[in-house]
Amino acid sequence: MLSFYDWYADLPVASPQVFGDQTDVPESADWWDAAYLMLWGSNVPVTRTPDAHYMAEARYRGQKVVVLAPDYNDAAKFADEWLAPHPGTDGALAMAMGHVVLKEFFADRETPYFADYVKRYTDLPFLVRLRERDGGYVPDKFLTAADLGTGGAFATVLLDSRTGEPEVPNGSLEFRYSEQGQGRWNLDLGDVDPLLSVLGEETAPVALPRFDGHGDGVLERGVPVRRVGGHLVTTVFDLMLAQYGVHREGMPGVWPQGYDDAAEPYTPAWQEAITGVPAKAAARIAREFAANAEESRGRSMIIMGAGTNHWFHSDTIYRSFLALTTLTGCQGVNGGGWAHYVGQEKCRPITGWAQLAFGLDWTRPPRQMIGTAYWYLHTDQWRYDTYSADVVSSPLGTGLFDGKSTADLLAQSARLGWMPSYPTFDRNPLDLADEAGDDPGAHVAKEVAEGRLGFACEDPDEPRNWPRVLTVWRANLLGSSAKGNEYFLRHLLGTGSAVRAEEAGPEHRPRSVTWHEEAPEGKLDLLVSLDFRMTSTTLFSDVVLPAATWYEKHDLSSTDMHPFVHAFTPAIDPPWQTRTDFAAFHTIARAFSDLAGTHLGVRRDLVAVPLLHDTPDELASPQGRAGRPSPKVVVVERDYPATAERLAELGPLLERLGVTTKGVTYDVGAEVERLRRTPGPALARDVDLCEAILALSGTTNGRLAAQGFETLARRTGTSFDGLADEHKRITFADTQARPVPVGTSPEWSGSESGGRRYSAFTINVEHRKPWHTLTGRQHFYLDHDWIHEAGEALPVYRPPLNMTAMFGEPELGVSVRYLTPHSKWSIHSEYQDNLLMLTLSRGGPTIWMSPQDAAKAEISDNDWVEAVNRNGVVVARAVVSHRMPQGTVYMYHAQERVVDVPKSEISGKRGGIHNSLTRLLIKPTHLIGGYAQLSFAFNYLGPTGNQRDEVTVIRRRSQEVEY
């Protein structure tokens, strides 16, 4: 199964990096509790229309609303202030705001609430070793007890301000899985008072990277230091002040001379030259945000979304946002913190859903693949990378990416077991399992070492490694999410495309991935779609199975926007040949099982499993050193003829092994026994499946939630009493009667207990439960080798990718920034082809542009235009609007080529869709795994399908169009 949250670029990679959590955010009703609200890259009235009233209504109780967006969008109409940073430069503005917060609320004076919060709940007091380089120093690894000879490599160290001695506080990863850690995985500091800064003794010069294009890319600044156990160390807090340019007396180096110093990062004046936001406005908003958080004890909130998350460097953008909410003590507070909304990623009854969605009741482990990497390889977009992976390297890097392509690093990540890669090997895993005998791991290692077995990702264009059958279930891949749409058409389907890009020359080709001189076209043998609409995907499909709509089947739904789980109940039966998803897949399974009796039988299957988050696999790479682990190899028995039978019945592994979510294992024997009695072990109906999901999840079954908190309490040594209602149980009938609020459970980090509004991390703050990170706290600092190579150990500003240098696109000014935001009147590609909507709008695809850009190209409103770059061409009508900033155009997401799309004058083919001008670009640091919070889990961590860095050239075309 392919991941989707990261593929859609809805996953904020900064969340696992900082919190060790996929995405946990407040429900929309919690916006009401915020006293200061920033909307940054999220156009709430458009993309969260049902929830926008909370934002509008809260202003009547004094809430200030600040909107940050490059265009004058719908949200700006509700704002007290509107700041318009240039697209992709949001990180520069956030870094400048962080400079103000650190200076005025930490360096100039101590803010007691902030100081207490960051000592308890962040990594700021923890010690970092400094490494010598060119006569100075660079930040290196966290100091651990292993460095001092007193403990393990995952026991991070801080100084006690009362004694000046090093201490290993509770809560780090060292205490999460070990027997001796029982009762110590908590945030109880006891008598220890963490020292934030070692200011007052020695100082040392430190070199830090800068990526704003000035000078040699290195900042020369200084930090206070101390010797601990023979190591020269400083604190994360001291490094943060150096990074942000907050000078303290006696520190060596080159520092900003004030807020109006535009030459030195990260002052308000420095950001103004990059973002266009006035320096005084940036400083004032930062000051207000922090002052409100101080006065309200954390009730300042940032709503953030696709406008800032769909960039190549989205993680550094988000880390600069999260620095603001964390420095000011807003995380884990109702009405405060981050509020990321892209997609509907929150499956509240997640434990039950996962067991049945992935068949974990019958076989474990499942094959779960990172979607972005899968498409990047199999649509051959890697062949068009005319740059080396070291384009992202820091000037202070050690050369880990030198001469390597992104495909090389992807293959390395697979070999190390960091990320999954399926198919894994270049031989059939059923045959490998037959060969392996009793020790499959040793057999595979020997075959790989002796060159008889390779990884499929090292030769994705070899026919035996191609995908052959693709089933698209209610996902409009080719009309909505396929970044690099024309590459999909050319290489995956083998049909006509408008790709204009040149393949990489010899100097940029991979070293460890085989290059075939002729790229394959048409890898798929069969494309099957299940849908109730004719879409771009179904048009290309070999087989289309008509699917029931939401109002013709039983199903469950939940979201991060509210705390309810509710039912879909059919208003009518599926008409004519239409079947529900449940019925369609059961029919397919029965036919498959009949054939499997002849062709497959019972086989052993060899599954390579990556190093997983929330398991002891997180301990695989001490100090984040690259090069030690490898994927685990597991043999699974597949009874192929029994597939349909197993699909229709609850399997035995639930009772035998229990169910595990985020490191907490639940005994569900009582639930399985109850399901056996009513409705029985058979899952023959969709309502039975819904009932099982609810019964097997802590959020909908209070008995499991209470049990989970008891298990967690034994590990943490702290109490979670009062959070779970042991007697609360939600049945499917309950959800059919009315939407039902879920209960508090260890599956999520917030609490709904007592009717409070859900807000992430309140359990961490109020019950001293660690975050799932290396230190057990929220992280400003990341010390993995690849993170250091990229220069991103600390929050940093990284500009949008330079498409001129990387791909030879025309420079900005000739080209324009090309963005694809979501629109109000559609759900992805659905509804905008409705006749009423088409009649009210332009009747087909449109591109929004500014009057200035239109004038340059002699374009008038409603003219037919063509937008072109190396990836393809789009034909659309121009919408010329004063709300658009100069140098940027919008083509709203998922306008399909099935309605009113003429032929292109450039390609001679029908004009493309919004993704015809995009393509996949993988950031190497998103491939890290096997180290603390930087470990794989499905939809939790992986490379994103980002697409916002693209540029295009737009020209007025002949107004006589041909279809």
Image (tube, rainbow, N blue to C red):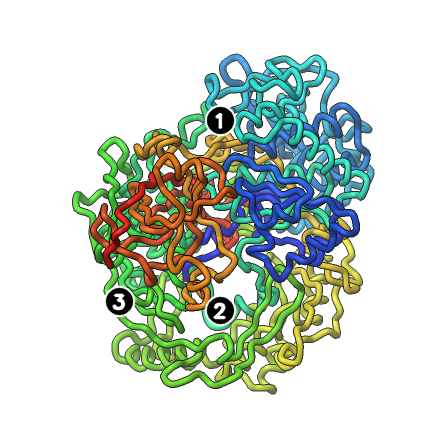
The residue under label 2 is: 357
Picture coordinates of residue 339 (x, y %)? 63, 50
For label 1, the SS is loop
The picture quadrant where one finds residue 170 is top right
Query: Left or right of 84: which side holds 66?
Result: right
Q: Nearer the viewer, residue 652 or 892?
A: 892
Identify which residue, 867 or 856, lies in the foreground.
856
- One can see residue 258 in this view: yes
Residue drawn where x is 37% and y is 34% of the image: 856
Residue at 25% across, 31% down: 507
Question: Residue at left 46%, top 64%?
Answer: 837
Q: Nearer the viewer, mark 2 or mark 3?
A: 3
Residue 963 locus on image (x, y percent): 24, 59
Name the N-terminal-most of marks 2 and 3: 2
Q: Are marks 1 and 2 in contact (CB under 8 Å)?
A: no
Q: Is residue 690 above or below residue 724?
A: below
Around disc 2, counting alpha carbons within 10 Å, would you say few (fewer than 14), some (14 to 19), or many (20 or more)? Answer: few
Q: Which residue is mark 3?
A: 526
Q: Quadrant of residue 258?
A: top right
Q: Position of residue 481 (x, y in %)?
A: 40, 56
Q: Give the class, few, some or many, for how many residues have Cα within 10 Å of label 1's Cα (few <14, many ≥20).
A: some
Q: Is residue 163 above or below residue 422?
A: above
Question: Can you name the residue that lies furthest to the left here?
Answer: 518
Reading the image, the residue beneath label 1 is: 211
CA distance separating discs 1 and 3: 45 Å
Kind of residue indicated by mark 2:
Ala
* Mark toward the viewer: 1 or 2: 1
